């Protein structure tokens, strides 16, 4: 896998975390500025848009990671099963761990050059 693909997968892995931090910060700013007010409709629509972006990124990440796990020659059948079960139960955390353990450390083969 090329370095560019690794960076792109890394960015898509950590994008939901970043977006959730932004949403939390925006909510805190709104709560401090308007303690008794109702949120404006554009703020709600913006949050829905960001949540949809998080969901789409999450679905794409699941497809990419499961595909990588299944095709990874360094993993045996038992390890693949364990990784897939962990992905099912603890998905976002396991994606980050798998990224650092298997995608970053993966060597580029001669046919990918």
Image (tube, grey):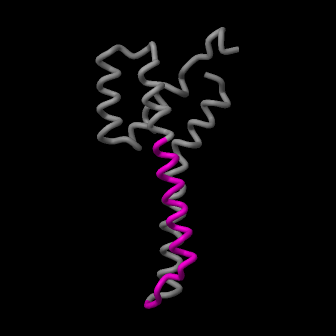
Classified by dominant secondary structure, the portion drawn in magenta counts as helix
Residue that appears at 42% across and 21% down: 70
Residue 38 lies in magenta, yes or no?
A: yes
Residue that appears at 50% across and 65% down: 48
Residue 18: image location, x then y, percent: 54, 54
- Check the image and name the residue furthest to the bottom: 36
- Which picture quadrant has residue 113? top right
Residue 89: image location, x then y, percent: 29, 40
In the picture, measured across the screen, residue 22 lies left or right of residue 67, that is right
Residue 85: image location, x then y, percent: 29, 32
Residue that appears at 50% across and 87% down: 34
| 93 to 18, vertically: above or below | above
Residue 78: image location, x then y, percent: 29, 18
- Check the image and name the residue furthest to the top: 110
| 113 to 10, vertically: above or below | above
| 26 to 38, vertically: above or below | above
In the picture, measured across the screen, residue 80 lies left or right of residue 30, that is left
Q: Quadrant of the N terminus?
A: top right
Residue 14 lies in magenta, yes or no?
A: no
- Which picture quadrant has residue 62? top left
Q: Which region shows up in magenta? A: 36-59
Residue that appears at 43% across and 35% down: 97
- Which picture quadrant has residue 43? bottom right
Q: How many labels does the image show?
A: 0
């Amino acid at each position: 896998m090329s370095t560019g693909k690794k960076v792109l997968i890394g960015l898509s892995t950590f994008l939901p975390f970043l977006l959730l931090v932004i949403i939390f910060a925006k909510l805190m700013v709104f709560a401090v500025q308007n303690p008794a007010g109702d949120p404006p409709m554009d703020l709600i629509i913006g949050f829905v848009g960001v949540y949809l972006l998080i969901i789409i990124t999450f679905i794409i990440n699941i497809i990419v990671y499961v595909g990588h796990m299944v095709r990874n020659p360094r993993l045996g059948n038992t390890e693949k099963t364990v990784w897939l079960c962990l992905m099912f139960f603890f998905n976002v955390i396991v994606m980050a761990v798998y990224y650092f353990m298997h995608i970053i450390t993966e060597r580029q083969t001669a046919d990918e050059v």
